Amino acid sequence: MKNFIEYISLYTQLVEKPFSYARLIQDLPLKNGEDNSLSHLNEEEIEPLLHRVANTAGLKATIKENSLENISLLELPVIAYTKDGFCLITQINDDITLLILDDQSTIEKKISKELFEKTFLNKIIVLKKRFIFSEAEDKNFGLGIKHWLFDTLKLSRKIYIDVILASLLINLFVLATPLFTMNVYDRVIPNNAIETLWVFAIG
């Protein structure tokens, strides 16, 4: 019977962030470095190891007591407790799609809900990506804001500075264009002052 850590390793492969089984257990306090005891843990022994292993894989693990009909599709895939051990539920439609590990391979199996409920223990392990926010990211989420306006403006001050500078440059071009045109028509063309035109153009 495969243990829950092997199913966490399988989960990481499904979400394309693979962690090998050996990597997940390498920091666990195993007797003589053997993992045979992991298949015979009770609920109290599983939970602390579960959080430790999930943390190694960059995941957050939650054990939930749920009937099959109350499993959210947004939570899939989930590790399910069954009378035969564990399995990974990947889809719930009219039938249920399971991934089951045996000694040599991973077996995909579709069974009816009625048949699965005979072995399902109404308990699942939900795994989600664990997010770690830096101090800079925390600021972007509004943490530590004291004034609703000025502190919010400070968060985007670089953007405002760029916008103000761009506005000034655009307005300068808008003002310069008619002045240039007016001087060309008033002074350059009547006097055929080519040198003056070059000065205006360079300026």
Image (cartoon, grey):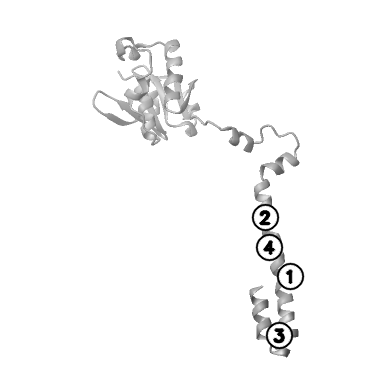
Residue 30 percent location from the top left of the image: 35, 12
Dot 3 falls on a residue whose secondary structure is helix
Q: Amino acid at mark 3?
A: Val
Which residue was labeled with disc 1? 175
Residue 169: assigned label = 4
First in residue order: circle 4 vs circle 2: 2
Which residue was labeled with disc 2? 163
Q: Residue at x 74, y 75 (%)?
A: 179
Q: Quadrant of residue 147?
A: top right
Q: Amino acid at mark 1?
A: Leu
Q: CA distance from mark 1 to mark 4?
A: 10 Å
Q: CA distance from mark 3 to mark 1?
A: 19 Å
Q: Nearer the viewer, mark 3 or mark 2?
A: 3
Q: Nearer the viewer, residue 172 or 23?
A: 172
Q: Quadrant of residue 188?
A: bottom right
Q: Is residue 122 visible?
A: no
Q: Nearer the viewer, mark 1 or mark 2?
A: 1
Q: Residue at x 45, y 10 (%)?
A: 44
Which residue was labeled with disc 3? 188
